[in-house]
Each structure stands twice: as C-alpha cells, then as structure tokens.
Amino acid sequence: GESVGLHLPTLSVQEGDNSIINCAYSNSASDYFIWYKQESGKGPQFIIDIRSNMDKRQGQRVTVLLNKTVKHLSLQIAATQPGDSAVYFCAESDGGGADGLTFGKGTHLIIQP
Amino acid sequence: ETGVTQSPTHLIKTRGQQVTLRCSSQSGHNTVSWYQQALGQGPQFIFQYYREEENGRGNFPPRFSGLQFPNYSSELNVNALELDDSALYLCASSWTGISTEAFFGQGTRLTVV
C-alpha cells in the first residue's frame, strides 16, 4: 500500500488567501520529504524539500512543516495566485536514491477568483 | 524547463506489442529514474539507472526493462503490453541518484488499446 498519502483530493481557495496542503506518511525511516507541483500535461516540478532532522523550511512564498511525532507534512503557500493551480504531491525518500521516490495520490489546488 | 526531454510525447499501442520510450537527461546529471503515473494517481517508481546499470527497482515485473547509455540518456522498454500499462511515463534525472534533486521531463502518454 501507499506509504505516503494526502488528506484531501481537492482544495479550493480564494486568490490572495494562504493555502495549506497536508500529507501523512508512515515510513519513519524516510530521510527526505519533498513537495512537487504538477500542472496539466507536465511532469512534476520540485517545490521544496525538508530533511527529517528539521521541523520547518521556507522558500519563496512556500513553507514546509514536518511533524515527526504524528508523521505529518504540510505545504503552506502564501498569497495564492492563479498560477498556483495544479496538483500537489508529497513524496518521501530514504536519501540514498536507489529506491526512488514514494509519492502520495496528490491534492488538486483550485484557485477561485 | 528542466532540460529533461522525453520522446515521443504521445503513443498508442496494441495489447501484446512492445514499446520503447526515450529520455535525455539534464546536462551534468548521471542518474536516470523512470516512473509510471496512472490517471489520478501519484507517480510510481519503476527503476533507476546509474553508470549504465540498474541500481534500484520498484514493484514492476521483468517485462519492464531499461537501458542507460554512455551519454546518460536512457530508454524504457515494455514488452507484452497490457491495457493497465496505459499511463504517463516520467523520466527524472539527477546527480549520483540523490532523489531530492531529481528533475522530471514532461512525460510520454502511452495508451494501450
């Protein structure tokens, strides 16, 4: 079964609001967690990652939070824009690479004007 | 754009046939991974190639095979196609197999009829 999953298949937010996309994982041995954005007809695009020894990491307009106690990962997008509309996947890795990335099912973020 | 290119972009094959998909990795990357993404699902890891050898494999049968060439480009071959093989096939390139730094191509949409 899936070791990484998302709580909601669809999230609708107003343009300009903040978006929070959640993810639950089950493999405590995972070393890296990554968020990808996939627009229609395109491959996944790296957004931000976080190592298991960190709780928070910030990028441009995005923040990833990791709660290892409850095995929960979240992606926060500030001031959501129409271009943020896409499917967002969390993925986990053991860091070594040879086992590939394990992806969840994804959350479709819809931006309301 | 990631610099990872895949060909063809779309392909229709008949059940039982064989198919070859191609991927050119981003300049400077020596590792290529392949993923299968069914409609509405997250990508599933097929295998990874490093220095022309398979060094990691997901839960896919032997009829899924691959090659990596000296220039680090790669092929995915699928024999005896089944209807369930219909999916988007994604190639990701990285340096020394570090999954979190993987860059994806736009994918090949394979339809098996």
Image (spheres, grey):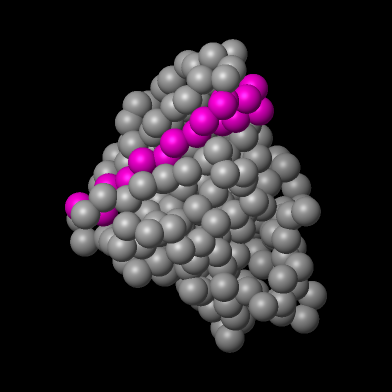
Q: Nearer the viewer, residue B101 or A99?
A: A99
Percent from the top left, x then y, of residue B110?
50, 25
Magenta residue check for B79: yes
In the image, residue B89 sits, relative to residue A70, either above or below, namely: above
Q: Looking at the picture, does residue B91 appear above or below residue A53?
A: above
Q: Residue at position x 61%, y 46% from top?
A: B60
Total of numbered circles in the picture?
0
Q: Residue furthest bottom?
A: A53
Q: Is residue A52 left or right of residue A72?
A: left
Magenta-highlighted residues: B71-87
Point out residue B23 in the picture as x, y percentages from the top left corner.
32, 41
Instruction: Please say whether residue B111 is visible from this viewpoint.
Output: yes
Q: Quadrant of the N terminus of chain B?
A: top left
Does the magenta portion include B12? Answer: no
Of the pair B54 and A73, the residue shown nearer to us: B54
Q: Is residue B26 visible?
A: no
Is B11 left, or right, of B60 in this rendering? left
Q: Quadrant of the C terminus of chain B?
A: top right
Name the residue at 55% across, 38% down.
B63
